[in-house]
Amino acid sequence: MLKGLILGILLGILLVAGGVYYYFSSGRAPVATSAPPIPFEESLARLGLHAYLDKLPHPEPQVPADEANLVSGAKVYKEQCATCHGLPNEPKTAVAQGMFPAPPQLFHGVGVTDDDAWESYWKVENGIRMSGMPGFKGQLTETQIWQVSVLVKNADKIAESVKKELAAGATTPMEMAMPSGNPAPKKK
Ligand code: HEC
């Protein structure tokens, strides 16, 4: 009786593992960004991220959400984030339209105004694996990450000065790929 049960469980595990392997090895799993998600792909990814974030400390923003910090955050945003996350009153970029998962448009609708700033801080610093959201640790200072985090937290109530900064000289994907401090190597 017990032997049969154990055998049954083992067989069941083997069948599931075999099925998953077959799904991927036979080319049935979606690989294009335009393909529909794997069943439960999005909900499982979200579950894993939230369970992880819940275990972290939840620090208060290390910069106040005043005009100076929001304007500095806007500078960072238009250089590093706008290509994917969009600008106020601008349509989605080609990059944003071609991505899976889609980058949420942070100046349209609620964006992440309903998330605490520390949560966005963590995501900007560390990135979100297998999503296209880069981690900026070492590329932006902690202060810059807080500034851009309080900016997206307050995206629904920014002042004219901040809107102006966002609109001034919005970057293109090409400029993003080749930041001015890092010119392309010259051909010999
Ligand atoms: C190359 C594209 C890309 C760039 C550049 C990028 N992101 Fe993202 N970001 C994404 C994608 C895609 C997601 C969605 C991830 C997901 O659904 O799991 C995301 C998610 C996020 C989230 C979480 C949104 C939510 O609803 O929980 C925040 C906050 C965020 N990004 C902020 C930023 C900031 C700030 C910058 C600039 C410093 C930035 N991102 C740069 C692609 C990008």
Image (spheres, rainbow, N blue to C red):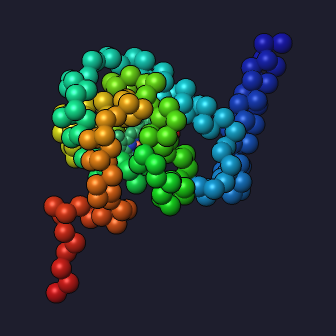
Residue positioned 27% across, 18% down in the render: 60
Q: Is residue 23 left or right of residue 147?
A: right
* Front-lying residue, 4 or 51: 51
Quarter of the image that includes the C terminus: bottom left
Which residue reaches farthest top?
1
Residue in the image at 78% along x and 13% along y: 2
Q: Is residue 122 visible?
A: no
Q: Which residue is drawn at the image coordinates 68% and 49% (left, top)?
A: 36
**Ligand 1 shown in quarter:** top left
Q: In x, y percent, where is residue 89? A: 46, 48
Q: Could you tell me how many numbered marks the image carries?
A: 0
Determine the image quadrant of residue 52. Answer: top left
Up/down of 25 relative to 49, above or below: below
Give the side of residue 58 with respect to residue 5, left or right. left
> Where is residue 69 drawn, in percent x and y?
21, 34
Residue 118 or 155: which is nearer the viewer? Answer: 155
Question: Along the line of sight, which residue is nearer the eye, 164 or 170?
Answer: 164
Res 35 visible: yes
Q: Position of residue 18 (x, y in %)?
A: 71, 42
Closest to the observer, 54 or 117: 117
Q: What x and y, as percent, mark residue 63?
A: 20, 26
In which quadrant of the rendered image does the N terminus lie? Answer: top right
